[in-house]
């Protein structure tokens, strides 16, 4: 894993026109080491070299981020003191690009210089830049106009070690907006500043869950078993969507009560909340029977599986059509264990999320 990540970061650094830091790169003939070499000694030395390579790449990455930041500052300063005529800034960038590319390589195109300018303007009020994030991470973050959303994604990408691809997916799935819609202004401010913090079961719940990575069509006919199989086949993406601290435990977990067998679709464990999380899949409308069944599963796990030092089990019913009124009156008012959430097979728009929240509020007010 260290090797692959280092190689990816090497490519990103190289794309900026800077020489690659690959002197410590493992040889492709690693498997041809003579048998008389002490394997334990070799493994220890190899690990030192891999860690050194990763450290060097991170250090170079940080130096380049600081360099780009300073380049952006100089460009902004020049524009502010430049000639007051249209086209001055663009002409300057084109001239700069020609000279820099001639000496330092293709990483200094007009487009990249614009990005460096935007980089400075966007993050000039931050005390420090994150050494964990690459230039590609920052170019994604710079596109976000909402400062609270940008701060949230930066914090989460840093603490959760998101790859560029994972960050891009979370932005496109409107993760911040989905979490923010169920919070008040103070909670949204905290979310933006600190990222997602799991302190209670409700903190890990999303509504809706976005499962666009399954490749299933919204109107297509599929069974609950096919949905489950698709989730398992895309487990890494599903874990990313579930959020922090999740570990897969089992699928179709059988429990037996009075000689009758029942099967829980998916079982996870959340290491941050120290509890089991049971997930039941429903491709149709949510019914009170579905909630009652999940209540049985949760009670069983609490009484028969949960250890004394673990928190109470959480149950999530993922359904295509969630009935808010049914969920509200079937579950007790002080419920903190069982949740029903919709799932979507496509990336929703922010307007769509807002409309859904408004519709839910109206239904609950009228019930």
Image (cartoon, rainbow, N blue to C red):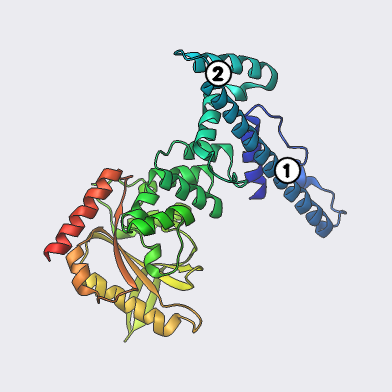
- Picture quadrant where residue 69 is located: top right
Residue beneath the point at 45% across and 44% down: 150
Query: Nearer the N terminus, badge 1 or badge 2?
Result: 1
- The extreme left residue here reads 366
Q: Is residue 264 visible?
A: yes
- The nearer-to-camera label among 1 and 2 is 2
Residue beneath the point at 35% across and 73% down: 337
Q: Give above or below for 165 relative to 184.
A: above
Q: Nearer the viewer, residue 283 or 116?
A: 116
State the SS at label 2. helix
Percent position of residue 5, x then y: 62, 45
Q: Which mark is residue 341?
A: none
Q: Is residue 220 visible?
A: no
- The extreme bottom residue here reads 258
Q: How would you rate the neighbour count of disc 1 (Cα within 10 Å): few for under 14, some for 14-19, many for 20 or more?
A: some
Q: Give above or below for 345 relative to 296.
A: above
Residue beneath the point at 44% across and 72% down: 276
State the SS at label 1. helix
Percent position of residue 306, x then y: 45, 80
Q: Which mark is residue 56?
A: 1
Q: Give above or below for 105 relative to 331.
A: above
Residue 45 left/right relative to 229:
right
Q: How would you rate the neighbour count of disc 2 (Cα within 10 Å): few for under 14, some for 14-19, many for 20 or more?
A: some
Percent position of residue 165, x then y: 50, 42
Marks 1 and 2, Cα distance to the nearest angstrom?
Answer: 31 Å
| Total numbered badges shown on the rendered structure | 2
Residue beneath the point at 30% across and 45% down: 348
Q: Nearer the viewer, residue 321 or 41?
A: 321
Percent position of residue 251, x then y: 42, 66
Q: In the picture, which quadrant includes the C terminus?
A: bottom left
Q: Nearer the viewer, residue 15 or 228?
A: 15
| Residue wearing tag 2 | 93
């Amino acid at each position: 894993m260290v090797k692959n990540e280092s190689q990816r970061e090497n490519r990103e650094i190289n794309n900026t026109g800077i020489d690659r830091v690959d002197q410590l790169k493992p040889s492709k003939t690693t498997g041809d080491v003579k048998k008389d070499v002490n394997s334990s000694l070799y493994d220890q030395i190899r690990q030192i070299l891999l860690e050194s390579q990763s450290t060097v790449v991170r250090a170079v990455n940080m130096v380049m981020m600081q360099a780009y930041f300073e380049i952006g500052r100089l460009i902004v300063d020049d524009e502010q003191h430049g000639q007051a005529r249209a086209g001055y800034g663009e002409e300057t960038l084109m001239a700069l690009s020609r000279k820099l590319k001639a000496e330092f390589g293709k990483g200094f195109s007009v487009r990249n210089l614009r990005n460096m300018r935007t980089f400075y303007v966007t993050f000039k009020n931050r005390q420090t830049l994150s050494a964990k994030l690459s230039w590609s991470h920052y170019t994604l973050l710079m596109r976000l106009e909402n400062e609270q959303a940008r701060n949230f994604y930066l914090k989460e990408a840093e603490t959760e070690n998101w790859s560029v691809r994972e960050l891009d997916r979370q932005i496109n799935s409107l993760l911040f907006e989905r979490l923010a819609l169920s919070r008040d202004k103070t909670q949204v401010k905290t979310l933006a500043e600190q990222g997602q913090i799991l302190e209670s079961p409700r903190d890990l719940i999303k509504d809706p869950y976005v499962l666009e990575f399954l490749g299933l069509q919204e109107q297509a006919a599929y069974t609950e078993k096919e949905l489950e199989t698709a989730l398992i086949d895309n487990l890494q993406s599903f874990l990313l969507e579930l959020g922090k601290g999740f570990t897969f435990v089992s699928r179709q977990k059988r429990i037996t009560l009075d000689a009758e067998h029942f099967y829980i679709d998916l079982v996870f464990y959340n290491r941050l909340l120290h509890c089991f999380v049971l997930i039941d899949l429903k491709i149709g409308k949510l019914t009170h029977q579905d909630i009652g069944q999940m209540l049985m599963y949760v009670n069983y796990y609490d009484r028969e599986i949960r250890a004394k030092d673990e928190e109470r089990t959480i149950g999530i019913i993922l359904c295509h059509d969630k009935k808010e009124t049914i969920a509200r009156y079937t579950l007790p008012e002080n419920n903190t264990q069982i949740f029903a959430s919709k799932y979507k097979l496509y990336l929703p728009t922010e307007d769509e999320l807002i409309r859904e929240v408004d519709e839910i509020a109206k239904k609950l007010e009228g019930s």
